[in-house]
Image (cartoon, rainbow, N blue to C red):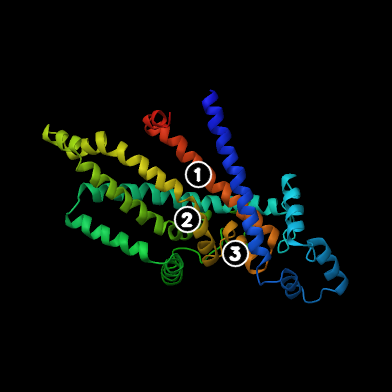
């Protein structure tokens, strides 16, 4: 028990130090940004008076030294106050809560698609290593890895929305329909294209990585011995292959959290999907510092949680990982 408490304490210390380091770096970069937040505010509100501008400068602490502004922001953060968004005129934590629900649905759909189908395709390529099927699918995956996400999103939008009309142009719900009247089927139709765009790159990476690991396993001595005893290919895959390639696949799948979070910014902007990525993009372009910093810290916690879940799954997949750690 003491060993577990010690490991959890070390993990929490890492999270805290990481958040402090990220907050300092992000705050410094935002302070050095050439975009003037007050100028962006005036451009967004052309009729604002001089008195309101002065009040806003005092409220945001524009004339205070950066170190003093950081300490004020960090002190408020410790009390659960992430600040107020200049764009949405609402508390940052409230915006993150509402926007993250849409982003989470998008990321989960893309994550499951890339993980399940990528792992299955990778196993298929590994079992047919060196054959025409493996060669063709591997080339397709390599092409998928080299194609930019925004380009794929535009192609999907033109083909499936404009030409074929199978899916809507964007948004997470139909335009003009109240949220309580939106059906699950309508939400899924709006989710499919952004999720496919977001999973495009991860799918290929998971498939190629799984193929490589499975080929290594199938050429090992114990697998060759199993084949010599008369075991079929499916039996070899089930008894010897899956457990040995599952941990690398889980590692890559959970490490893709940061990639999915970054890709969601592109996918949500292409399809006008009202998620956290679109809010982060708007905050960066309009110099909404509280919202931008809040989303940044939240994304760090989210990625760190993905790595923690992966570490917990290692023990369930292969208990020997715990023994090795001891």
Front in this rendered view, residue 203 or 240: 240
Determine the residue located farthest toward the right in the rendered image.
Answer: 51
Circle 2 is placed at which residue position? 259
Residues under numbered marks 2 and 3 in contact, where contact means CB atoms less than 8 Å apart: no
Q: Secondary structure at mark 1?
A: helix
Disc 1 to disc 3: CB gap under 8 Å: no
- Alpha carbons under labels 1 and 3: distance apart: 23 Å
Of the residues under marks 2 and 1, which one precedes in the sequence?
2
x, y (%) of residue 268?
Answer: 54, 62
User: In the image, residue 179 lies at what x, y percent?
Assistant: 63, 54
Q: What is the x, y in percent for residue 145?
A: 36, 61
Give SS at disc 3: helix
| Mark identifier at residue 281 | 3
Q: Mark 2, residues whose alpha carbon is within 10 Å: few (<14), some, or many (≥20)? A: some
- On the question of residue 176 being in view, the answer is yes
**Residue 80 percent across, percent down from the top left:** 73, 45
């Amino acid at each position: 028990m003491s060993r577990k408490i010690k490991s959890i304490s070390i993990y929490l210390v890492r999270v805290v130090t990481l958040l402090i380091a990220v907050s300092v770096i992000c705050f410094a970069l935002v302070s050095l940004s050439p975009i003037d937040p007050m100028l962006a505010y005036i451009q967004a509100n052309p009729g604002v008076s001089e008195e309101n501008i002065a009040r806003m400068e005092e409220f945001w602490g524009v004339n205070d030294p950066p170190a003093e502004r950081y300490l004020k922001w960090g002190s408020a953060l410790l009390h659960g106050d992430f600040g107020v968004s200049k764009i949405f005129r609402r508390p940052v934590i409230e915006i993150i809560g509402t926007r993250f629900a849409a982003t989470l649905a998008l990321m989960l759909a893309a994550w499951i698609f890339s993980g399940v189908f990528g792992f299955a395709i990778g196993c298929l390529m590994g079992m047919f290593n060196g054959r025409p099927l493996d060669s063709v699918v591997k080339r397709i995956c390599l092409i998928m890895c080299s194609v930019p996400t925004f380009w794929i999103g535009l192609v999907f939008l033109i083909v499936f929305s404009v030409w074929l009309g199978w899916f809507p142009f964007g948004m997470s719900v139909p335009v003009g329909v109240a949220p309580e009247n939106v059906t699950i089927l309508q939400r899924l139709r709006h989710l499919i294209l952004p999720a496919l765009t977001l999973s495009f790159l991860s799918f290929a990476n998971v498939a190629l990585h799984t193929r490589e690991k499975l080929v290594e396993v199938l050429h090992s001595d114990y697998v060759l011995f199993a084949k010599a005893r008369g075991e079929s290919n499916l039996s070899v895959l089930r008894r010897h292959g899956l457990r040995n390639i599952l941990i690398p696949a889980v590692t890559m799948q959970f490490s893709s959290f940061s990639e999915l979070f970054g890709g969601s910014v592109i996918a949500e902007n292409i399809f006008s999907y009202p998620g956290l990525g679109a809010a982060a993009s708007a905050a960066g372009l309009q110099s909404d510092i509280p919202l931008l910093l809040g989303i940044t810290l939240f994304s760090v916690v989210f990625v760190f949680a993905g790595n923690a879940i992966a570490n917990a799954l290692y023990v369930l997949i292969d208990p020997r990982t715990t023994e090795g750690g001891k």
